[in-house]
Amino acid sequence: MLGRFTQMLLGSLFLPLLSLGLAGVSPAQQLPNEPTARERTLLAESYTSERLFLWQKRLNLQDWNIAVVMSRASELKPKTLGNIHWDLEKKTATIRVLDPADYKLPFKEMLQDMEFTVVHELIHLNFAPVVSEFPRSDANRREEEHSVNHIADALLKLDRNP
């Protein structure tokens, strides 16, 4: 899916260049190795939505209405890459993922990190009915984060290294 979207996006960028008389210039000279800031955001939105659909199914959360939203670092807690807010009764949730503009990683690694954030937050959602019944403290939040990180890491390793 990402490959088709990238080809479509790059194709839509290439056609206007032809009309400007740049047909004699090679594509490598026209487009940078890394996508532009706007392209990174569009590709990241598409990619995270695609991965949300896949992981939502794998984690048996299809009955939830979940959205992914790109968020600037200033909109997230310090030293975080995302978060999730849910409504158990309505079965709705919003996953906030760090916007590409605030990433310092190369594009491919950034997308993998965003997928980790989506999976991490979906695991929190799976635990939501259980953890909402208990009083929350800094200690049990740290333990939950530690466990969720390990589970997300294990699932992604299985997915990426079949």
Image (cartoon, rainbow, N blue to C red):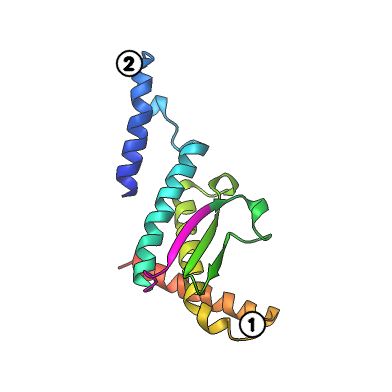
Question: In the rendering, at what x and y percent does residue 141 appear?
Answer: 63, 78
Q: Nearer the viewer, residue 58 or 18?
A: 58
Residue at (50%, 65%) from the top-left corner? Answer: 93
Distance between the Cα atoms at labels 1 and 2?
62 Å
Q: Nearer the viewer, residue 60 or 159?
A: 60
Residue on which the image places disc 2 = 24
Q: Earlier in the sequence, mark 1 or mark 2?
A: 2
Q: Residue furthest front?
A: 90
In the image, which residues are magenta?
Answer: 60-69
Q: Residue furthest top?
A: 21
Q: Quadrant of residue 57?
A: bottom left
Residue at (33%, 24%) from the top-left corner? Answer: 15
Q: Quadrant of residue 27?
A: top left
Based on the picture, tell me whether residue 146 belongs to the magenta stretch.
no
Please indicate, yes or no, whether residue 160 appears anywhere in the rendered image: no
Question: In the rendering, at what x and y percent does residue 71 appear?
Answer: 58, 52
Vertical placement of residue 2 versus 161, above or below: above
Residue at (57%, 44%) from the top-left corner? Answer: 101
* Disc 1 element: helix
Question: In the rendering, at what x and y percent does residue 135 appear?
Answer: 66, 85
Disc 2 packing (10 Å; few <14; some 14–19; many ≥20): few
Whether residues under marks 1 and 2 lie with C-beta atoms below 8 angstroms apart, the answer is no
Residue on which the image places disc 1 = 140
Amino acid residing under circle 1: Asn
Question: In the rendering, at what x and y percent does residue 34 appear?
Answer: 46, 38
Amino acid residing under circle 2: Gly
